[in-house]
Image (spheres, helix red, strand yellow):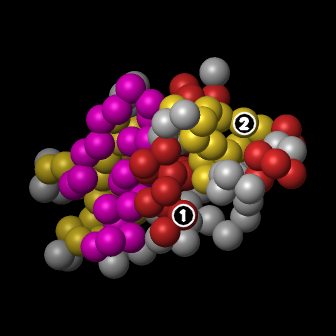
Amino acid sequence: MLEKICTDLETSKRLKELGFNDSESEFVILCWDGEPIYYYRLQLTAVSEKRDPTPTYTLEQILSELPQIVEIHNNIYHLMISKNSIYYFSHSKLEVFANYQENNLSTAAAKLWIKLKEDKII
């Protein structure tokens, strides 16, 4: 269930590297026999915590960190979300900036945040 509403392992690790959201997430991912397994942070035991849990984030947490509007090369882009994609759209130019499409919208939103961070837009 959590894998449907939280970011995937690879994206979660990248978010952690880039310093996403100083507050702790309620959820983490642990790898057991090479497979990522999601947990509520409060369910972890001291033994599990030694396996280096990776925080994972929900769409709501990521949206709270994404700006509603960004300016890129003197163009204004507004945050847009559809069923499986998230992107910035310029109404004046009728163009899209950084469209991410995933089955998991949390992961798509996280990839958009990563793009903005790496491009030093945020």
Where is residue 44, by image quadrant? top right
Dot 1 amino acid type: Lys
Residue 58, relative to residue 1: is it above or below?
A: below
Q: Earlier in the sequence, mark 1 or mark 2?
A: 1
- Residue designated by label 2: 39
The N terminus lies in which quarter of the figure?
top right
Write the residue at 44% across / 60% down: 14
The region drawn magenta spans: 97-119
Q: Position of residue 54 (x, y in %)?
A: 61, 53
Residue 9, relative to residue 14: is it above or below?
A: above
Where is residue 104, by image quadrant? top left
Which is more toward the observer, 38 or 1? 38
The C terminus lies in which quarter of the figure?
bottom left
Write the residue at 21% across / 55% down: 97
Q: Position of residue 3 (x, y in %)?
A: 56, 29
Can residue 6 be seen in this snapshot?
A: no
Q: Position of residue 118 (x, y in %)?
A: 32, 71
Q: Which label was assigned to residue 58?
A: none
Q: Position of residue 27 (x, y in %)?
A: 71, 43
Which element carries disc 2, helix, strand or loop? strand
- Residue designated by label 1: 16
Write the residue at 74% across / 56% down: 50
Pointer 2: residues within 10 angstroms few (<14), some, or many (20+)? some
